Amino acid sequence: MAIFSRAFTGCLTACALSVGGVAGADVVKSTRAQGPSDELSAYYAKMQRTFQDRGLLKTIRTVPQSSMTAASLKRDFLEIALHTEYGGGLSASGSKAAKPLLRWEEPVRLQVMFGASVPKDRRIKDLKAISSYTNTLARLTRHPMTVNPNKPNFHVIVVNEAERKSLSKTLPKLVPGISKSVVRNIAKMRPNHLCLVVAEPHADRSRGFKRAVAIVRAEHPDVMRASCIQEELAQGLGLSNDCREAYPSIFNDDQEFALLTRRDEVLLRMLYDPKLRSGMSADEVSARLPEITKRAM
């Protein structure tokens, strides 16, 4: 989700975790065992109930009365794919600063990592969900994406509050060259910052993204957990901003939709259309959108 979010030391170690032939996951270990915070777990469970009582966090993919026109898709795409909150280095979701088009131009290899606090059965469930969703994203974009610990470039980290704070020490080793400001942002995530993705482009923007890191809180209940996974991975592919007018869409801060919608799928197909490439300006992208939008719909 696009909202940014005790003393604990940790290290990253490999852990074999085979799930139905899916690549194994690493574990963020700590010097002491500690499960997800009961207080935060209760906080997020209450938040999920409140959202759902208000008709939010819907899991439907389409809304019958909504329309999907070429003009509205162009508006949404230019706002979501051509803007980002942070101007340089690693960029995070939920932004307003203009930027060139950025996407992955090389295969995406995801590595899923869990805090030692996350029970094995929960890891298995999360890993299956992330692997299945990765396959969905690969199908939609027609871009190679796999859950693969061999030379990963997209790290998905599921950790509790204490383990998240420890990442300020371990992230520079996990992601060499990561900006200090982004490490601080991850370390300072407040409870209302539900999850986060950061994606670093190559110095040559025409080469697209070089690496990405997504943070998912271990304390989240099922629907919020699935929502974080789906939105952050999609935003980490290049749909980095939110747009109030986008509807129905997960790229909207109103939390109405929890999972990728039909509209979002079209936006992803547009992003990875062969007529586009990383480094293009808004004007260059805009000129190609009529043809691209028609093909994506």
Image (tube, helix red, strand yellow):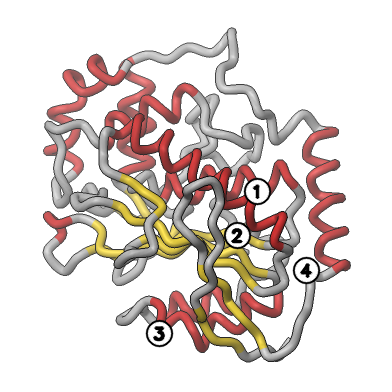
Q: Which residue is mark 4?
A: 36
Tell me, for residue 112, which label it has, or none.
none
| Three-letter code for the amino acid on which mark 1 is drawn | Lys
Mark 1 crowd level (few <14, some 14–19, many ≥20, 10 Å Cα)? few
Give the label on residue 173, or none: 3
Locate residue 62 relative to residue 70 in the image: left or right: right
Q: Is residue 223 above or below residue 191?
A: above
Q: Residues within 10 Å of mark 4 (few under 14, many from 20)?
A: many
C-beta proximity under 8 Å, tags 3 and 1: no
Residue position marked by numbered label 1 in the rendering: 125
Q: Amino acid at mark 4?
A: Pro
Q: Earlier in the sequence, mark 4 or mark 3?
A: 4
- Residue 158, image quadrant: bottom right
Is residue 198 in view? no
- The residue most toward the top is 65
Quarter occupied by the C terminus: top left
Q: Earlier in the sequence, mark 1 or mark 4?
A: 4
Sooner in the amino-acid sequence: mark 3 or mark 1: 1
Question: Which amino acid is tagged 3?
Answer: Lys
In terms of secondary structure, where does tag 2 sit?
strand
Percent from the top left, x then y, of residue 238?
A: 33, 48
Pointer 2 or 1: first along the chain? 1
The front one of 289 and 14 is 14
Question: Is disc 1 placed on a helix, strand or loop?
Answer: helix
Which label was assigned to residue 216?
A: 2
